[in-house]
Image (spheres, helix red, strand yellow):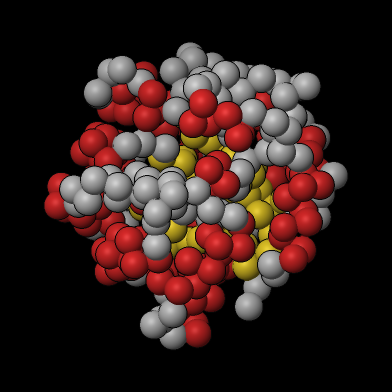
């Protein structure tokens, strides 16, 4: 079965530092993860297209990712970054689209999970920026914690013309097994027709050393019930996933938790939804 990996990262520390990689727990990530490394994994596991996603909130990274994409038949889309609050946001998006690789710009995101303002997503300047993203024909990836799902719901309702893609199912608290509020908020978000979600990043929300597929299954089931396979897409979250699992283990876990779906539904999760949502 063809696989589109809707969420992975690449970085070269010689080109750009990843200042979020701090402390001993994240130390395994403090090295280069290059396109050649990712291609070997993709070729070995049937991945025929991918979406590479930003990691740092600096304007230089997105052009670098677009340049990688334009030279690659594997990277089909780039989710980049630009300052949503900038008065000239529309011009900034247009300038990115004109760069080498610009046609592969499919979306934008911001590290909302790190914003101290609990209402950042619904600030007037941010909503103005989100409206500009919609007018540009791009999607907006939500990288948030489970406690921020409420503001994501309000933002998605406020900008109905924009497709919002929820990364990592909103980071449910798998390790602590406190799921009631997350599940209720996820269903509220899924009730909005302009939202889709990624079956990604779950292994690093579980116990990194002791997780099993059974730990992930309840969360996948809630997401499948809320969004349906046609609005849910697989993403590896490589290389961040390697803190808890190898690439083949992440892919195997996703296949396991979707094993009861029909062939057509599995096709949606592993390629169709990403292709449609990002217009790959």
Q: Give how far across and how far down residue 199 sits, in percent.
A: 44, 58
Closer to the camera in the image, 221 or 233: 221
Q: Give how far across and how far down residue 122 sits, in percent.
A: 28, 27
Q: Which residue is rendered at x = 36% and y = 21% of the image? A: 115
Q: Which residue is rendered at x = 39% and y = 56% of the image? A: 211
Q: Is residue 140 above or below residue 49?
A: above
Closer to the camera in the image, 154 or 34: 34
In the image, is 175 to the left or to the right of 104? Answer: left
Image quadrant where one finds the C terminus: bottom right
Q: Give how far across and how far down residue 71 sits, in percent.
A: 85, 44
Q: Quadrant of residue 27?
A: top right
Q: Which residue is rendered at x = 55% and y = 62% of the image? A: 249
Q: Give how far across and how far down residue 213 sits, in percent.
A: 40, 65
Give the residue furthest to the top: 87
Closer to the camera in the image, 278 or 97: 278
Q: Is residue 265 above or below residue 145?
A: below
Q: Quadrant of residue 216?
A: bottom left
Q: Which residue is rendered at x = 37% and y = 29% of the image? A: 113
In the image, is 139 to the left or to the right of 211? Answer: right
């Amino acid at each position: 079965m063809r696989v589109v990996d809707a969420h992975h990262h690449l970085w070269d520390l010689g080109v750009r530092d990843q200042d979020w990689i701090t402390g001993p727990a994240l130390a395994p990530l403090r090295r280069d993860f290059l396109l050649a490394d990712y291609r070997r994994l993709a070729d070995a596991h049937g991945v025929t297209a991918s979406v590479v996603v930003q990691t740092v909130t600096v304007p230089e990274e997105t052009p670098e990712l677009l340049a990688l994409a334009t030279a690659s038949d594997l990277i089909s889309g780039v989710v980049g970054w630009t300052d949503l609050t900038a008065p000239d946001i529309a011009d900034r998006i247009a300038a990115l689209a004109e760069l080498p690789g610009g046609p592969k710009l499919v979306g934008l995101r911001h590290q909302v999970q790190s914003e101290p303002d609990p209402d950042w997503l619904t600030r007037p300047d941010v909503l103005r920026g989100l409206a500009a993203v919609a007018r540009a024909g791009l999607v907006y990836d939500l990288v948030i914690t489970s406690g921020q799902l409420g503001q994501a719901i309000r933002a998605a309702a406020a900008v109905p013309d924009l497709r919002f893609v929820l990364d990592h199912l909103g980071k449910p608290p798998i390790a602590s097994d406190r799921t009631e509020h997350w599940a209720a908020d996820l269903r509220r978000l899924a009730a909005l027709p302009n939202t889709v979600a990624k079956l990604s990043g779950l292994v690093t929300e579980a116990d990194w050393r002791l997780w099993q597929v059974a730990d992930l299954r309840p969360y996948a089931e809630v997401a499948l019930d809320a969004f349906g396979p046609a609005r849910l897409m697989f993403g590896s979250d490589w290389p961040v996933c390697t803190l808890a699992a190898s690439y083949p283990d992440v892919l195997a876990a996703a296949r396991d938790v979707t094993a009861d779906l029909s062939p057509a539904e599995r096709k949606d999760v592993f390629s169709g939804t990403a292709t449609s949502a990002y217009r790959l």
